[in-house]
Amino acid sequence: MGVLGALTALAFIKAFEGTKAVAEKLSRRFPMPCIVILGGLILGAIGLLYPEVLGLGYDLIHKVTVAELGELSLATLVALLVFKIIATSITLNFGGSGGLFIPALYVGGTLGLIYAQALNVEPPVFCVMLAMAAVLAAVNKTLLTGIALVAETIGPSFIISTVVSAAISYFLTGDASFYKSQILDRGFR
């Protein structure tokens, strides 16, 4: 799960940075209201297909952690994961506001449920928590935050597995992060 979390985190970071580059290029040619409208149109189209990816995502995160989404197909779960990455990247880079912490949990939880369903792992909440911690540790470069979150949310029963998953993801992603200044301030290059 740590390796899959790292790969997903890298994809999320690259999508976010790529969308930022596109938004910056567009801002040189078009006024900001046009860019905001374009972002809104794209988000609206995504929302028509998968309304679950819009907004904060607390409902989906809750359902994922209590394994209430077992009825969704793997294709739908993959679409939710991909479109959440796209929607978050567009929102934050095309003039919207929001954060990256909850979307990282959303992406991690969805990844864990995909893994659990694909391999028929029981209980699925085990994979969900490992993936949440792995993605969070990688994208934010906060190893202990993901581990503490799982310990607070689920309890200490998954703590050793969570430490391993988050550490693997954290170290495999190197200096990739949503927060470049955070890495540079610590002296890492």
Image (tube, rainbow, N blue to C red):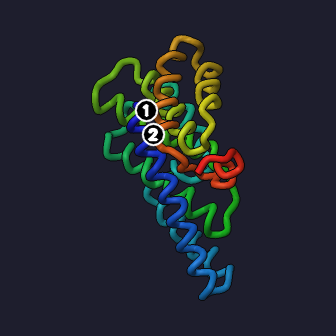
Height in image: 160 above or below 176? above
| Percent of width and height locating residue 41 | 54, 71
Q: Which residue sits at x=47%, y=19%?
A: 161
Quadrant housing residue 21: bottom right
| Percent of width and height locating residue 147 | 59, 25
* Residue 50 seen anywhere in this rendered image of the structure: no
Confirm or deny contact between disc 2 and disc 1 (CB under 8 A): yes
Q: In the rendered image, which residue does mark 1 sit on?
A: 2
Q: Secondary structure at mark 1?
A: helix
Between 157 and 35, the one nearer to me in the picture: 157
Q: Which residue sits at x=44%, y=52%?
A: 11
Height in image: 151 above or below 96? above
Height in image: 82 above or below 117? below
Q: Residues within 10 Å of mark 1 (few under 14, many from 20)?
A: many
Q: Which residue sits at x=56%, y=76%?
A: 38
Label for residue 172? Answer: 2
Between 144 and 122, the one nearer to me in the picture: 144
**Label whose residue precedes the other's in the sequence (2 or 1):** 1
Q: Residue furthest top?
A: 157
Q: Secondary structure at mark 2?
A: helix
Amino acid type at circle 2 is: Leu
